[in-house]
């Protein structure tokens, strides 16, 4: 969010000159910081002021702007203030004059010039004793000049920048500010000082998404408005940009460049149910509702509390998704057409949709529902959706982008085949051939039948797996349950991207297997019948066994290492809640029986990990209590599935972090 900083022309800009260039016997005068509390004291504690604050104090005591220039008078006042900061009460006149000559390049400044300095609050001069008496100050003005930073120019000169603020305005209102520049040569001699045009100074407050490493990957701000996806957070940062026309350069100071963290940004929300802001202003968290609110921000001086800038901007928390395919993916045949529908919640204004597909033909690309015709050859591509506010500037740099999303589109031929693995102890190995043994367990997978092909089936099963032994059949469907008769038993298999079952045969003979999948409630693809010879002596029926060690693969293909694959759960958000708590939300995953949440103060989960088990797969949130304030916690989640008394786990989700601030 970029806003112009209004400037007030004033000769007090010269504070930059002295604050940055006057050294004044470094061994005797030490620059020190002043706290916000001390700056509020009625008696001025000069010893804890830095040089910039001292010069600002001199300027603040002068009522006439015409007096606020570098002159014999102001130079002498500043030198007196420096002596006061060192605790000196008297100074010899010749020493005092020498300091002025050294620091201001006033080669002719002498005791005669000193005697002509006006009466002031900083010192008095006795011509008889030739002594300067340093005064104590009783009141500090509200004006403050703060050093921002400097920039070295290509010709070796240097330009320093600063800002004046005044705290006399009412709280929450804009303070007038003055931005100034000081040009120094290679020897730190002043070349010029100047004010900057209000059109050439910008404050930009940025709202954006970061990856797990903290990198900025996407801006949430568009045309002066903020749009944050539901159950996400917006990181917040700011920077000041100065277009310096005299030096023909653009200089930028972000919050990390600014000397000593001299500014702080504070945020507030009109509706915490939509956008929450915790202690500090490093992020905006979405609340429990979608909709629009307003965010107010203030940029303040840390030392004085003076407000440099304040503004309010609209903020919308929304959700945007593409309805096409299912949770497993979006699969179509070559040259097949498929509709995709935008689902936008939280924004009530008129919008324009912009659909793009990397491969294929797009129809109705500006409507809520588009139609995509896949290319003639198999390919993995994406459907892209951008939603604009219908403000007459759609597609231009002045337009407002509400949000963007994408969805994978896989163009494939859907060729089905069976593969199987043989259990050996608690694990399985890949098997080949057409001979099985009585009493042993085998894991059959219908390869190529990705659940992403399950489209518009309603209550109709997506697949059937028909196992026929010596003329007696058992048929497995979407309904995950164990099946058995006197000849064989069928276990529900494992998660993963393909239909699969575990079978144990109890009688020798001939086993045939056939697989079918359905779309739109109709037969879509089927395999040829595969025949196996079953050898061995008859055994008593029992449930098929399963390996005891978990596999941690989430591949949509048949696993090649220990047996059971379980679909990974998506971790959606982790937020700090009041009372040193954090609330964790994730996407529902019915491929397993439940979830395991793990959290730690170690980024790599190297030590001190704690785990919470959620036993119901319909649960999608959990709050953890008794956390430590000011600590950062890292969180991840995985799915677990129990089969025949054994427990198997998915891979861990991506990691999210949260700092406990309240």
Image (cartoon, grey):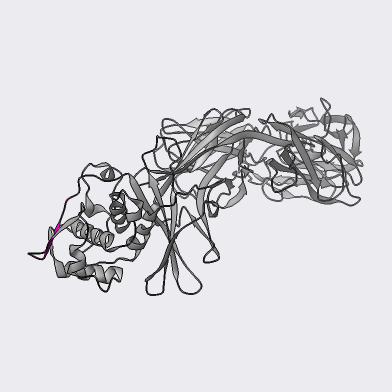
- Residue 587 in percent (x, y) is at 64, 34
Q: Is residue 27 above or below residue 124?
A: below
Q: Is residue 155 above or below residue 66?
A: below
Please give the name of the residue rendered at 20% of the width and 49% of the height, measured from the top-left corner.
Answer: 137
Question: In the rendered structure, which segment of residues is drawn in magenta?
Answer: 126-136
Q: Quadrant of the C terminus?
A: top left
Q: How many marks?
A: 0
Does residue 511 appear anywhere in the picture?
Answer: no
Q: Nearer the viewer, residue 223 or 246?
A: 246
- Residue 447 in percent (x, y) is at 81, 45
Image-based side of 375 in relation to 257, left or right: right
Q: Nearer the viewer, residue 567 or 325?
A: 325
Name the residue at the top extreme. 459
Image-based side of 333 in relation to 617, left or right: right
Q: Is residue 107 above or below residue 396?
A: below
Q: Quadrant of the N terminus?
A: top right
- Residue 113 in percent (x, y) is at 21, 66
Image-based side of 644 in relation to 295, left or right: right
- Residue 245 in percent (x, y) is at 54, 62
Please give the name of the residue rendered at 87% of the width and 33% of the height, measured from the top-left corner.
Answer: 519
Q: Determine which quarter of the picture holds residue 149.
A: bottom left
Image-based side of 313 in relation to 120, left or right: right
């Amino acid at each position: 969010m970029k806003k112009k900083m209004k400037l007030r022309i004033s000769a007090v800009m010269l504070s930059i000159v002295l604050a940055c260039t006057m050294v004044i016997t470094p061994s005797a005068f030490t620059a020190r910081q002043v706290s916000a509390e001390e700056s509020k004291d009625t008696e001025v504690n000069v010893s804890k002021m830095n040089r910039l604050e001292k010069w600002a104090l001199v300027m603040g005591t002068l009522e006439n702007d015409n007096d606020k220039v570098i002159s014999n008078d102001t130079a002498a006042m500043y030198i007196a203030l420096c002596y006061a900061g060192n605790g000196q009460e008297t100074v010899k006149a010749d020493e005092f004059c020498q300091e002025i000559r050294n620091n201001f390049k006033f080669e002719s400044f002498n005791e005669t010039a000193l005697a002509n300095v006006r009466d002031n609050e900083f010192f008095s001069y006795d011509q008889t004793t030739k002594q300067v008496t340093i005064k104590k100050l009783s009141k500090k003005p509200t004006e403050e000049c703060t050093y921002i930073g400097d920039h070295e120019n290509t010709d070796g000169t240097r330009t320093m920048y600063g800002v004046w603020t005044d705290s006399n305005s009412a709280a929450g209102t804009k303070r007038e500010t003055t931005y100034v520049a000081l040009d120094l040569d290679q020897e730190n001699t002043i070349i010029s000082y100047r004010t900057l045009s209000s059109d050439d100074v910008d404050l930009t407050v940025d709202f954006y998404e970061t990856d797990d490493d903290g990198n900025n990957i996407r801006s949430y701000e568009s045309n002066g408005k903020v749009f944050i996806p539901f159950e996400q957070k917006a990181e917040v940062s700011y920077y000041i940009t100065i277009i310096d026309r005299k030096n023909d350069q653009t200089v930028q100071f972000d919050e990390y460049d600014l000397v000593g963290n001299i500014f702080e940004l504070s945020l507030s929300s009109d509706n915490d149910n939509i956008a929450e802001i915790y202690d500090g202003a490093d992020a905006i968290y979405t609340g429990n509702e979608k909709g629009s609110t307003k965010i107010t921000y203030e940029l303040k001086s840390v030392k004085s509390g003076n407000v440099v800038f304040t503004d309010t901007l609209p903020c919308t928390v929304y959700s945007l998704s593409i309805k096409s395919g299912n949770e497993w993916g979006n699969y179509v045949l070559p040259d097949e057409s498929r509709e995709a529908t935008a689902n936008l919640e939280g924004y009530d204004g008129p919008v324009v949709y912009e659909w793009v597909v990397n491969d294929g033909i797009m129809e109705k690309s500006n409507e809520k529902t588009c139609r995509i015709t896949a290319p003639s050859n198999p390919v993995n591509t994406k459907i892209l959706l951008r939603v604009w506010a219908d403000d007459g500037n759609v597609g231009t740099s002045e337009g407002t982008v509400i949000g963007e999303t994408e969805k994978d589109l896989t163009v494939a031929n859907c060729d089905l085949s069976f593969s199987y693995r043989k259990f050996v102890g608690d694990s399985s190995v890949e098997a080949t051939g057409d001979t099985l043994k009585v009493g042993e367990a085998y894991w059959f997978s219908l390869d190529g039948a990705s659940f992403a092909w399950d489209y518009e089936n309603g209550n109709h099963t997506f697949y059937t797996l028909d196992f026929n032994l010596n003329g007696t059949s058992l048929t497995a469907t979407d309904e995950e349950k164990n099946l058995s008769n006197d000849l064989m038993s069928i276990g529900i298999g494992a998660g993963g991207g393909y239909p699969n079952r575990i079978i144990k045969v109890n009688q020798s003979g001939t086993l045939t297997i056939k697989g079918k999948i359905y779309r739109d409630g109709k037969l879509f693809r089927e395999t040829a019948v595969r025949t196996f010879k079953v050898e061995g002596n008859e055994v008593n029926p029992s449930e098929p066994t399963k390996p005891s060690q978990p596999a941690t693969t989430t591949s949509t293909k048949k696993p090649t290492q220990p047996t059971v694959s379980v679909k990974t759960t998506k971790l959606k958000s982790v937020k700090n809640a009041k009372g040193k708590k954090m609330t964790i939300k994730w996407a529902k995953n019915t491929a397993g029986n439940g979830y395991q949440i793990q959290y730690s103060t170690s980024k790599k989960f190297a030590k001190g990990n704690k785990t919470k088990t959620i036993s119901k797969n319909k649960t999608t949130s959990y709050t953890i209590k008794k956390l430590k304030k000011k600590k950062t916690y890292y969180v991840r989640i995985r799915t677990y599935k129990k089969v025949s008394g054994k427990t198997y786990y998915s891979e861990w989700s991506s990691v999210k972090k949260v700092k406990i601030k309240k």
